[in-house]
C-alpha cells in the first residue's frame, strides 16, 4: 500500500495495480500507509497464523495479535497461487494446485 497525492487530494492504493501517471506523487511511509499496512497484516495473520513469513513481517510493523477471527490456527499458507503458477510457468507442469485434495490423496 502506498499513498498517492495529486494537487490537493490523496488516497491509499495498492502499488502493484495502480497505473503510473505523470504528476502524481507516491509516498511509501506516511502515517496512513503504516496504519493500513498494519490492518492488512492483521487480516493476513488471521488467515495464516502459522506462516513464519507473515508473522515476521507483521512483527516488523508491531502486529503481534489480530482482532479478526482465526478459522484455522494451523494454517501456514495464504493460498496465493504463486507455487502453482511457478510450477506451470517455470517448470512447465501442472503438478501443484491450490484446490483441496481428495481424501485418497490426503491419506497417502
Image (cartoon, rainbow, N blue to C red):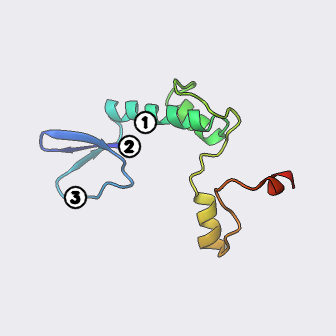
Q: Quadrant of residue 71?
A: top right
Cα distance in 3D space between marks 3 and 2 = 17 Å
Identify the residue shown where x is 80% and y is 52%.
103
* Residue 42, image x, y percentages: 51, 31
Mark drawn on residue 21: 3
* Residue 104, image x, y percentages: 83, 56
- Check contact, mark 1 vs mark 2: CB within 8 A: yes
Question: Residue lying furthest right in this view?
Answer: 108
Q: Secondary structure at mark 2?
A: loop
Q: Of the residues under marks 1 and 3, which one precedes in the sequence? A: 3
Looking at the rendering, in which quadrant would you find the N terminus? top left
> Few, some or many C-alpha atoms within 10 Å of disc 2 (few <14, some 14-19, many ≥20)?
some
- Check contact, mark 1 vs mark 3: CB within 8 A: no
Identify the residue shown where x is 52% and y is 27%.
68
- Check contact, mark 3 vs mark 2: CB within 8 A: no
Identify the residue shown where x is 56% and y is 52%.
80
> Number of labelled discs?
3
Mark drawn on residue 101: none
* Residue that numbered label 1 is attached to: 37
Cα distance in 3D space between marks 1 and 2 = 7 Å
Residue 59 against residue 108 in the figure, above or below? above
Cα distance in 3D space between marks 1 and 3 = 23 Å
Q: Is residue 98 left or right of residue 20?
A: right
* Residue that numbered label 2 is attached to: 1
Q: Quadrant of residue 84?
A: bottom right
Q: Of the residues under marks 3 and 2, which one precedes in the sequence? A: 2
Q: Of the residues under marks 1 and 2, which one precedes in the sequence? A: 2
Amino acid at each position: 500500500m502506498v499513498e498517492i497525492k495529486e494537487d490537493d487530494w490523496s488516497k491509499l492504493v495498492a502499488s502493484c495495480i495502480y497505473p503510473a501517471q505523470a504528476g502524481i506523487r507516491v509516498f511509501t511511509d506516511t502515517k496512513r500507509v503504516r496504519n493500513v499496512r498494519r490492518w492488512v497484516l492483521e487480516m493476513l495473520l488471521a488467515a495464516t497464523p502459522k506462516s513464519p513469513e507473515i508473522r515476521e513481517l507483521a512483527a516488523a510493523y508491531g502486529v503481534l495479535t489480530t482482532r479478526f477471527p482465526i478459522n484455522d490456527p494451523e494454517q501456514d499458507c495464504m493460498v496465493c497461487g504463486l507455487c502453482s503458477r511457478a510450477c506451470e510457468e517455470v517448470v512447465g507442469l501442472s503438478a501443484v494446485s491450490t484446490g483441496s485434495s481428495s481424501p485418497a490423496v490426503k491419506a497417502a
